Amino acid sequence: MARGTDFLGCDYAVLGGAMSWISERNLVSALSNAGAFGVIACGAMTPDLLDTEIAETKQRTSKPFGVNLITMHPALSELIDVCAKHEVTHVVLAGGLPPSGSIERIKANGAKLICFAPALALAKKLVRSGVDALVIEGMEAGGHIGPVSTSVLAQEILPPLAAEVPIFVAGGIGHGGLIAGYLEMGAVGVQLGTRFVCATECIAHPNFKKAFIRASARDAITSVQIDPRLPVIPVRALKNREMESFAAKQREVAQLLDEQKVEMMEAQLQIEHYWAGALRRAVIEGDVETGSVMAGQSVGMVKDEAPVAQILATLMDEAAHALERRSVHA
C-alpha cells in the first residue's frame, strides 16, 4: 500500500468513492482526517458551488483530498479552474474519456489526475495520454456502472499495467480480506463508497442509512435500458418504486429525441439531472421510495452506523490479518 499512500499523501490508500450529495465537506474531511483520502463529488454542481464546497472542506481538514469531476459537465473547463484556484492536489475524471485538452490543463495546474478505466484498451490509452493513476471499477459498485465485474477487470488490467501507473480497485469491496487480495495482485489501494454511507459523519438522511443497513446484496439491482436509441449508463441502486419510474423517464426523453427537440448530448444530460434529483430526494429528504437509493452490492455487509475512523480500522485490521495468514501458509 506504500506506493498508494505516497501517491495520495495519506496514511491509508483508500479513496472515498465520489457519491453525489453524500461525498461533501463533512464525509470528505472525516475520511482525510482519519488517514484515508476523501473525494468531493462535484456531480452537477456549478463552479460557484464547487468553489464553496472546496473552501468549506479545507476549513475542516488540513489533509489532502480530491475532487471528482464528470467529463460531460457543460462547465468542465470552469470546474478545472476552480480546482486550480484552490490548489486541489488530485482531480478524478469520471464518466467517459477526458475531453480534448482537459488532461493537459489539470496536470499543468500541478494536480495529479486519476481516471476510471472500464476496459484494458481504454486503460492503455489513458496511460499513454499522461494520466497519473487509474481506478478500475466493476459492476458490483453503486451508482453508474459498467458491464464487467471487478474481479475480471482486476485480472485483465492489473498484470499488464500495475508496474506502469498506480491502480486502485473499486466495486463490491466491503471486507479488508478482499483489499489484501487486490494489493497482492498489484493494486496500490482501493476505492470504497457504499461502506462509508453509514458513517456517523455522513450527512445522508437516517432513512437512507436505515435502507442500507436493512438491505442485502441482492437488493442492489441495476436499471434497465428501455430504448436502444438512447444510450443510458446503467445505475445500481436498491430496488424501489424509483427504479420503475426511471423507465418512464427514458421513454419521455426518447420521444424528445424522436421529435428532434433535443440533441443526444442534451438527452443524456437530462437523464443525469434526473438521477441527481432522484438521489437528492433519497439522500437529503429521506424519501427512499420515490428517490434513488444508489448502493453497491457490498451494501449487505453494512450492518450499523459507525465513525469513519472505526470503519477504516476494521478494514485495515481485516486486510492485515489476511496478509498474515497468507505469509504463515506460504
Image (cartoon, rainbow, N blue to C red):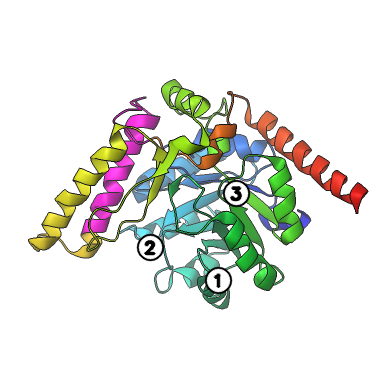
- Measure how far apart labels 1 and 3 are at the Cα level: 19 Å
- Measure how far apart labels 3 and 2 are at the Cα level: 26 Å
Residue found at x 56% / y 78%: 128
Would you say residue 270 sits in the magenta stretch? yes
Q: Nearer the viewer, mark 3 or mark 2?
A: 3
Reading the image, the residue beneath label 2 is 77
Residue bounds of the magenta highlight: 267-292
Q: Position of residue 189 (x, y in %)?
A: 68, 53
Kind of residue at badge 2: Ser
Q: Position of residue 256 (x, y in %)?
A: 12, 56
Q: Mark 3 or 2 closer to N-term?
A: 2
Q: Nearer the viewer, mark 2 or mark 1?
A: 1
- 30 lies left or right of 70: right
Reading the image, the residue beneath label 3 is 191
Would you say residue 148 sits in the magenta stretch? no
Q: Nearer the viewer, mark 1 or mark 3?
A: 1
* Residue sitting nearer the eye, 80 or 223: 223
The prevailing secondary structure element of the residues shown in magenta is helix
From this view, report whether residue 295 is shown above or below residue 211.
below
Residue found at x 52% / y 62%: 115
- Dot 1 falls on a residue whose secondary structure is helix
Reading the image, the residue beneath label 1 is 120
Residue found at x 24% / y 39%: 245
